[in-house]
Image (cartoon, rainbow, N blue to C red):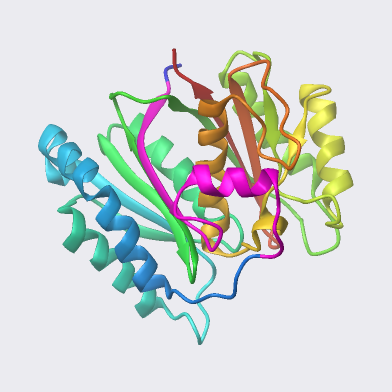
Amino acid sequence: MAGFPITAWAMRHPWGADTTAVLDHLRAPRGAPLAATTTAPELATSLLDELAPACAKACARWGASRVASILGSAAPTVEHPLSRLAQTLALVRRHTGIGGAAYHIASTETGGVKALASADRMLRASLADAVLVGGIDDDHGALLLVERHGTSFVDLHASAEATGATDHSTLDEAAAARTIAAAWAVGGRAPLGYVHVHADDDDPHAAAERRVIHSVVGDVPCCATRRRLGSAGAGAGAIDVALAAASLSRGFTPEPHPRELEHDRVLLHAFSPRGHHVTLLLEARE
């Protein structure tokens, strides 16, 4: 099954304004991320300004009504109500000219990754020809443009989702295994460069997540970035996807002591405290 090229991406983080800056910082950490100084609407405007030319080309190529936008988010709260999510989608339309379907996916810690999985399904069902996806929080965010065809270094090759009984203390290993195995199978179970995992080493779910991964795909390097980046909201999953795509382009794992990738594919697994599990398969293009 053919994948869909990620033709453009942009990210923002206190460590830097792009994936290169953040990956370089991960190699030589200089302390914790800075305190938030940019609000989500301000950050969204900055990301959309950067991606506006790529979005305009997509609208011209496919027609504005065939370009969709899907943004991940955490569950709405008093501080971040539904109205704020609607305002962000309105920003997308004003800054990009996108006229297709537009909606949010609310899933704490996995919203940005679920947005990519939803885009994968939408493209495979021919409901759109390009989708702008991502997640945005105060001071953390990333947006990616996925198209049916186009020039890119990285493809979104497959996605898989499941709902399980994961909570703050216990990982639903069966649900995690189902999504990891399903996404990997689409790629023909080809060798992986690394797995971009959700849980950092000191997370209570880390041992279980790695146990599942190794039982399904074998002894593959695992790397996590969320805890070090200080990003756990809607932008976390989208930032992980952007860093995984950039790591495939660079050929090294995203960690303090990077390992050279032996293969040009990466699985990215994410889960929410309420039980959502999502796995994406990204593949470098020749």
Q: Is residue 200 magenta?
A: no
Q: Position of residue 140 (x, y in %)?
A: 51, 63
What's drawn in magenta, residue-wise?
A: 3-32
Q: Quadrant of residue 15?
A: bottom right
Q: Nearer the viewer, residue 256 or 274?
A: 256
Image height of 33 relative to 269, above or below: below
Please state if 213 lies on the left or on the right of 267 as rendered.
Answer: right
Please state if 29 lies on the left or on the right of 122 as rendered.
Answer: right
Q: Position of residue 97 (x, y in %)?
A: 15, 53
Image height of 205 relative to 160, above or below: below
Locate the C terminus and report the quarter of the image it occupies: top left
Image height of 86 relative to 199, above or below: below
Q: Nearer the viewer, residue 29 or 143?
A: 29
Q: Nearer the viewer, residue 148 or 45?
A: 45
Q: Residue at left 51%, top 50%?
A: 238
Q: Position of residue 24 (x, y in %)?
A: 60, 43
Q: Residue at left 28%, top 32%?
A: 126
Please state if 98 lies on the left or on the right of 79 as rendered.
Answer: left
Q: Is residue 29 magenta?
A: yes
Q: Position of residue 162 (x, y in %)?
A: 63, 44
Q: Residue at left 64%, top 13%?
A: 190
Q: Residue at left 59%, top 22%?
A: 265
Q: Quadrant of residue 176?
A: top right
